Amino acid sequence: MASNSSSSSEFTGRVALVTGGARGLGRGIAELLASRGCTVAIVDRKAKWAQGAAEAIGCGAFGLGADVSVQAEVQAAVAATVARCGRLDIVVNNAMWNRYDPLADITPATVDRMLGVGFGAILWTTQAAAPAMRAGGGGAIVNIASVSARLGFAGAMVYCGVKAGVEGLTRAAAAELACDRIRVNAVAPSTIATEGVRAMLDTDAFAARVADTPLRRLGEIADIAEAVAFLASVRAAFVTGQTLIVDGGITAVL
C-alpha cells in the first residue's frame, strides 16, 4: 500500500458513503478517506451523531441519519448524497448491531436486528448505490466482514452466521455488478482495539486476545481503514469478489 504522504490526494473528486460512520471503525474509515481527498457522506442511526462526526472531520464531509436496516431510509440517504454531490464512487458498508448470547438465550428480536443491520443493510445499500455508480462509469463497494465468518466462537452463533453471509453476498454482488465496472470486496478484521472493545474487555481478557495474535497486538482502526482505502482505490482496480483478512495472523495458525 502507498504511504500516507504519497496517497494524500488519491481520492480527490471522489464521493464516498460510509455507514455506521459516526464512531469507532466507521469514523476512522471516514476520516482516512476524507484526508485523502474524498467527500464523505457519513450515515448513522442518529442524524446528530453523523452530523457531529462530519463537522469534526471537515473536508466537506456531511452527515445523514438513517436506519440502514430499512430499505427506504437507505434509498433516501443514497439519493441525498447523489443530489448533493452529483455522483457516488465508493460505499463502505460498516454498520453493525452486535449482541452475543448462548444458544438458549437467542431471541427472534436479536436475530432480526442483527440480520437487518449486518446483512440486509449491505444488500439495500448496494442496491441503492449501484445505479449511481453505473451512471458514473463504475465504483467500489467495500463490506466489513469478520474472521468470525471462518472461526467459530461460543456465544457468537448469530454474529458468525451474519458475517459469513456478508462474504457470500460480497462474492455474488461482485459477479453481478462486474459488467458495470463496480467492484465489490470485503475486509475481515479480527478484534480491533476500538474504544468499545477496550471497555468490554478487562485487562486479562485483553492480554489473552493479544497473546492469541501472532503479531502480538490487536489491530488498530488505522489497520482496517488502510485496507478499506486500498480496496476502494485504483490500486485495486483488478480486485473484486475478494475478502481481505486483516487479523495479525490469527487465521494462519488457528
Image (cartoon, helix red, strand yellow):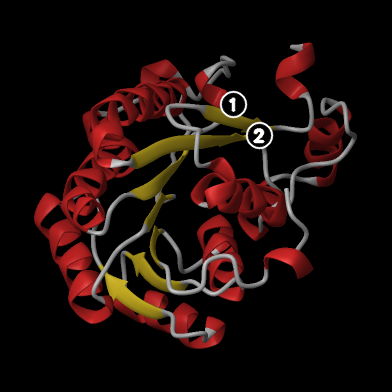
14 lies left or right of 174:
right
In which image quadrant can residue 174 be found?
A: top left
Point 59% across, 31% down: residue: 244
Relative to residue 86, is residue 7 drawn left or right? right
The mark tally for this picture is 2
- State the image coordinates of residue 226 (x, y, percent, origin top left): 66, 52
Q: Is residue 21 above or below residue 177?
A: below
Q: Where is residue 252 in the image (x, y as percent from the top left)?
A: 76, 16
Q: Residues within 10 Å of mark 2 (few under 14, many from 20)?
A: many
Q: Is residue 97 visible to the viewer in this orientation of the structure?
A: no
The amino acid sitting under disc 1 is Val
Q: Can residue 29 be seen in this view?
A: yes
Judged from the image, the secondary structure of the residue bearing numbered disc 1 is: helix
In the image, residue 22 lies at what x, y percent?
46, 69
Q: Depth check: give the residue in front, 215 or 171.
A: 171
Depicted 127 relative to depicted 148: above or below: below
Between disc 1 and disc 2, whose residue precedes? 1
| Label 1 Cα crowd, 10 Å radius (few <14 / some 14-19 / many 20+) | many
* Residue beneath the point at 44% across and 20% down: 157
The one of 87 and 249 positioned closer to us in this rendering: 87
From the top left corner, tell me how far across and down residue 46 is, in percent.
31, 71
Q: Identify the residue shown where x is 59% and y is 26%.
A: 147
In this view, the residue farthest toward the left is 72
Q: Identify the disc placed on residue 147.
A: 1
- Mark 2 and mark 1 in contact (Cβ < 8 Å)? yes
Measured in 3D between alpha carbons, the distance from the residue under mark 1 to the one under mark 2, in whole angstroms, is: 6 Å
Instruction: Examine the image and state in which quarter residue 28 appears.
Output: bottom right
Instruction: Identify the amino acid type marked 2.
Output: Ser
Residue visible at 70% across and 56% down? 222
The residue carrying mark 2 is 190
In the displayed structure, 60 sits above or below 162; it is below
